[in-house]
Amino acid sequence: MQMIHRAALGLALLLAGTAAHALTATELVAKNIEAKGGAAALQGVKSLRREGRLVVNGGQFVLELAETKQRPDSIRTEVSMQGLSQVQAYDGKDGWRIDPFGGRKDPERMPADDVKEFIEDASIDGVLPDAAAAGNLIEYLGTEDVDGTPAHKLRITRKEGGVQYVYLDPDYFLEIRVESQRVVRGVKRTSVMDYGNYEKVGGVFWPLSIESGLKGEGDPAKFEYKSAVVNPTIAPDYFSFPATATK
């Protein structure tokens, strides 16, 4: 009887010790990378193209959407409607855009504050792996409710300025929300991106549903991707400011 009691007590202590172990920021970053497919699979992705549609203004406008990323820091997005195409791109050094919806059909340089946001969006690996690789401070803040999910919350303090909060699903350790605090043209603002509908392509899980908007301001834009292609063929000058444009 004493042996059974001791065994039960030992099991209780073991379970208590396991429950008491709090996850660290380092462990959560590692779990996030593993959940996506692992470091090797991520590094095998040199470029990514996703296509679908962009829904804005509560569904009043639906545009065709194409987004292409390439390591180390290049990104280009195109949204089209009624024969017009808006282009926004960053080639690792400069950001530029063509905005016919705003009455501008010629390529123009992007303001510095907008370029900062594009640098973050150009990431293939994701916010946490990039922050860890850059040596930014990452802190675990416990759990917080995100639409009914007790998500793991981490804070990233960037060396170049700005703070981000990353929320991970407690079961799958994939991002379900990222809040980014930035100063844009002298005004502090917080953008919120919600991630969902993850699908595995090329050995990596990618979110094919993203809602993006400013915190507390109107309906978020909805990025609904129908396809993802890993390592597509990309023209050498695809991300660069058009050579024929006036600089």
Image: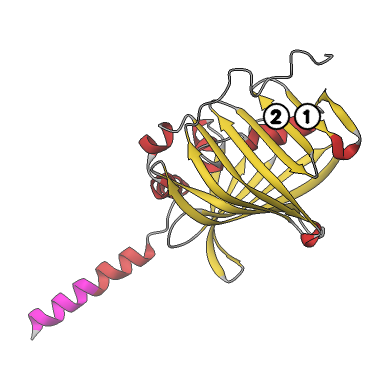
Would residue 203 be counted in the magenta stretch?
A: no
Q: Residue furthest bottom?
A: 1
| Number of residues whose C-alpha sits closer than 10 Å to that of mark 1, classed few (under 14), some (14–19) or many (20 or more) | many
Tell me the distance, in whole angstroms, between the alpha carbons under discs 2 and 1: 6 Å
Asked whether the viewer can see residue 139, the reply is: yes
- For numbered disc 2, what is the local secondary structure? strand
- For numbered disc 1, what is the local secondary structure? strand
Highlighted range, magenta: 2-11
Where does the image place residue 58, in percent across and percent down from the top left? 78, 61
Residue 135 position (above or below residue 188): above
Q: How is the image coloured?
A: secondary structure
Q: Residue at x 53, y 62 (%)?
A: 151
Residues marked 2 and 1 touching at CB (< 8 Å): yes
The foreground one among 198 and 194 is 198
Asked whether the viewer can see residue 185, the reply is: no
Q: Residue at x 77, y 61 (%)?
A: 59
Where does the image place residue 217, in percent across and percent down from the top left? 82, 58
Q: Quadrant of the N terminus?
A: bottom left
| Number of residues whose C-alpha sits closer than 10 Å to that of mark 2, classed few (under 14), some (14–19) or many (20 or more) | many
Disc marking residue 89: 2
Q: Mark 1 points at which residue?
A: 97
Residue 16 position (above or below residue 85): below
Where does the image place residue 136, in percent across and percent down from the top left? 56, 35
The foreground one among 86 and 84 is 84
Q: Which amino acid does label 1 sit on?
A: Arg
Helix, strand or loop: magenta stretch:
helix
- Compared across the picture, whether 26 is left or right of 226 comes to left
Return the disc, 2 or 1, that comes first in the chain's sequence: 2
